[in-house]
């Protein structure tokens, strides 16, 4: 299929998560694109039934494009540990889920440590898939990764999710210790967005 450029100046962000919406809106604003979120439009949240980051990002972007009639962007991200054959992977958020529906990332990170501590292989990576979907069903999807090692105990207060146990290759600080601008320059989300921007966005 031929690559499609984004001609629209406004798109729907298929997220109900305010933090993600802010981050993605800022990246798009750099290319002169305004956003409205699926949350603001009151669109339903589709179930993430795919087994890959690209699959889930595509499913969410297509659902929003069909429901809103607008070009829509969705992301799906997660943390993978080599010694755990890539787990938690697409189940990254689920590992933090508590019986009362809240998320406990300290517990999720402790689970990684409990399962992986016996392996000398400390390699880990974050992945981020970004998908752009058009109402006619066309999709462009991209995968960005940030490689490094998992560390224990958790370090730093700045990030979110699994940031305190991830030190990117070539860096001394964890994602949660470093200046957020540094994280945003080298993160999996930045890598995916660069690919998407190069392929589909008008030059800013
Ligand atoms: P999603 O909302 O389905 O994409 O789930 C993403 C999961 O991966 C959540 O549990 C996040 O906390 C975690 N995650 C994704 N990106 C990052 C990151 O940059 N730092 C830390 N955790 C992340």
Image (spheres, rainbow, N blue to C red):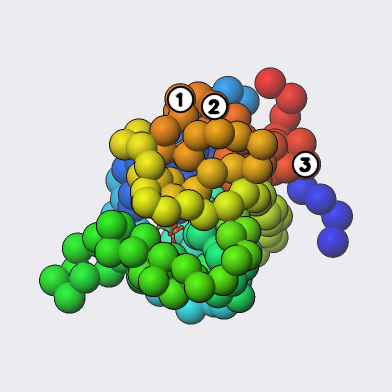
**Is the residue marked 3 within 8 Å of ligand 1, measured from its CB?**
no
Question: Which residue lies at the image location 14% right of the left edge and 71% below the top edge?
Answer: 100
Query: Which is nearer the eye, 78 or 23?
Result: 78
User: Is 50 placed above or below 33 here?
Assistant: below
Q: Is residue 186 above or below residue 132?
A: above
Query: Within 10 angstroms of label 1, few (less than 14), some, or many (20 or more) residues?
Result: few
In the orientation shown, which residue stands out farthest toward the left? 100
Report, in whole angstroms, how far the alpha carbon at label 1 lies from the one at label 3. 29 Å
Graded by Cα atoms within 10 Å as few (under 14), some (14 to 19) or many (20 or more), the crowding at tag 3 reads: some
Q: Quadrant of the C terminus?
A: top right
Residue holding disc 1: 179
Q: Residue 124's quadrant in the figure?
A: bottom right
Percent position of residue 201, x then y: 70, 35
Instruction: Answer with mark 2 or mark 3, whichever residue precedes in sequence.
Output: 2
Quarter of the picture for ligand 1?
Answer: bottom left
Query: What residue is shown at x 50% (from left), y 24% (from top)?
Result: 181
Q: Are marks 2 and 1 in contact (CB under 8 Å)?
A: yes
Q: Residue, x 54% and y 44% (percent of image)?
A: 167
């Amino acid at each position: 299929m031929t690559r499609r450029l984004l001609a629209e100046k406004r798109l729907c962000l298929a997220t109900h998560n305010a933090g993600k919406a802010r981050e993605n809106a800022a990246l798009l604003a750099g290319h002169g694109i305004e956003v409205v979120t699926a949350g603001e439009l009151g669109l339903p949240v589709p179930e993430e039934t795919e087994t890959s980051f690209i699959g889930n990002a595509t499913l969410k972007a297509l659902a929003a494009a069909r429901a809103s009639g607008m070009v829509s962007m969705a992301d799906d991200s997660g943390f993978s540990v080599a010694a755990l054959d890539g787990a938690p992977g697409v189940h990254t958020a689920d590992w933090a889920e508590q019986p009362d529906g809240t998320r406990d990332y300290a517990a999720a990170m402790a689970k990684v440590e409990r399962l992986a501590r016996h392996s000398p292989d400390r390699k880990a990576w974050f992945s981020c898939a970004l998908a752009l979907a058009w109402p006619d069903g066309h999709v462009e999807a991209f995968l960005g990764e940030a490689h490094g090692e998992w560390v224990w105990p958790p370090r730093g207060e700045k990030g979110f999710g699994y940031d305190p146990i991830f030190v990117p290759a070539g860096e001394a600080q964890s994602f949660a210790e470093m200046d957020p601008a540094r994280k945003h320059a080298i993160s999996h989300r930045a890598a995916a967005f660069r690919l998407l921007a190069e392929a589909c966005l008008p030059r800013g």
